[in-house]
Amino acid sequence: MSGSAPPPDSAALCADLVRSHDFPHYAATLFAPAAERRGLLALYAFNVEIVRVRDQVSQPLPGEIRLQWWTDMLSGQVHGSAEGNPVAAELLRAIRDFDLPVEPLSLLADEHQFDLYNDPMPTMAALEGYLAATSSALFDLAARIMGPPSAAAEHLARHAGLAQGIVQVIANLPRDAARRQLFLPQQVLASHDCDVEDVFAGKETPNLRAALGQLSGEAQQHLTTALSLLVEVPASVRPAFLPLGQAQADLKRLSQPGRNPFTPQPSSRLRTLWTLWRASRSREFTK
């Protein structure tokens, strides 16, 4: 790992990347101190780069090569090109400044190889494993930037990631179904006699609504648990979990009776800012 400082504009590039492609996480960093905010933006920019791989390739192999570059970079096998990549340079800086563990970052990239293929998510346990290595890991790493690592923050991060991740699975159904990708567990669909081909065809059925209702219930349980655990971490660490405010608002919107699950319902940036501001002032984040 090089100890040289990255170019000054690399931080701005990371901020622009997160603002453009993951506005809820970008907005959440506005509630963090400047030094920690730079680290958070590096972390979230890395996540954006990993998540976007599926959209940037037409075949799995080029996607695997891109993901492998990141795991090689994190293991120290990539040298000059790492410092030339602004996101990599900022991530290496955050790893050094906040003593972040490299293994969960590598595992996050590895786990997103699933995105490159249209293999269905088989079970609820498999989905939880995927989300633990991606969404939960991201929360845990963000918490490490905001304060010393602790078992309480790790426990909170697991539930926070599962809640946020399941909400995103429900929200992303229109996009995923259109490209015949299934993050809804087959096990859950089968338990409600929901035909996978109906999902891919964008058919709104009572069976699908029941399956989504089960997932919404799982998300709500994890969300309730996560919010109750906030009191166990220092106030300085809690801004890392502000995206839970957006997840809570999204889950409420996605659970409205009569909503067509195949109609995208993105939140405006203004509403996102308002939602996170309200969350930052809520009892869970301030008590």
Image: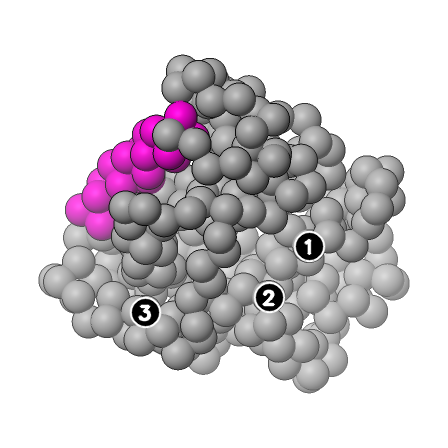
- Earlier-in-chain disc, 1 versus 3: 1
- In the displayed orientation, state which residue is furthest to the bottom: 8
Between residue 209 and residue 181, name the one nearer to us.
Answer: 209
Cα–Cα span, label 2 and label 1 = 9 Å
Question: Where does residue 2 sit, x and y in percent of width and height?
Answer: 76, 63
Cα–Cα span, label 2 and label 3 = 17 Å
In the displayed structure, 227 sits above or below 146; it is above
Between residue 207 and residue 255, name the one nearer to us.
Answer: 207
Q: Is residue 87 found left or right of 173 in the rendered image? A: right
Question: Where does residue 231 sit, x and y in percent of width and height?
Answer: 17, 53
Secondary structure beneath disc 3? helix
Q: Is residue 236 found left or right of 180 in the rendered image? A: left
Secondary structure beneath disc 2? helix
Instruction: Tell me what residue is drawn at x 40 percent, y 15 percent.
Output: 191
- Earlier-in-chain disc, 2 versus 1: 2
- Can you tell which quarter of the image residue 83 is in? bottom right
Magenta-tinted stretch: 207-228
The disc labelled 2 sits on which kind of residue? His
The disc labelled 3 sits on which kind of residue? Leu
Instruction: Tell me what residue is drawn at x 32 percent, y 34 percent.
Output: 213
In the displayed structure, 211 sits above or below 159; it is above
Most frequent secondary structure within the magenta stretch: helix
Answer yes or no: is residue 205 visible. yes
Q: Which mark is residue 52?
A: 1
Please name the residue that numbered disc 2 is placed on: 21
In the displayed structure, 186 sits above or below 113; it is above
Instruction: Tell me what residue is drawn at x 64 percent, y 51 percent.
Output: 51
- Can you tell which quarter of the image residue 33 is in? bottom left
- Earlier-in-chain disc, 2 versus 3: 2
- Cβ–Cβ under 8 Å for marks 2 and 1: yes
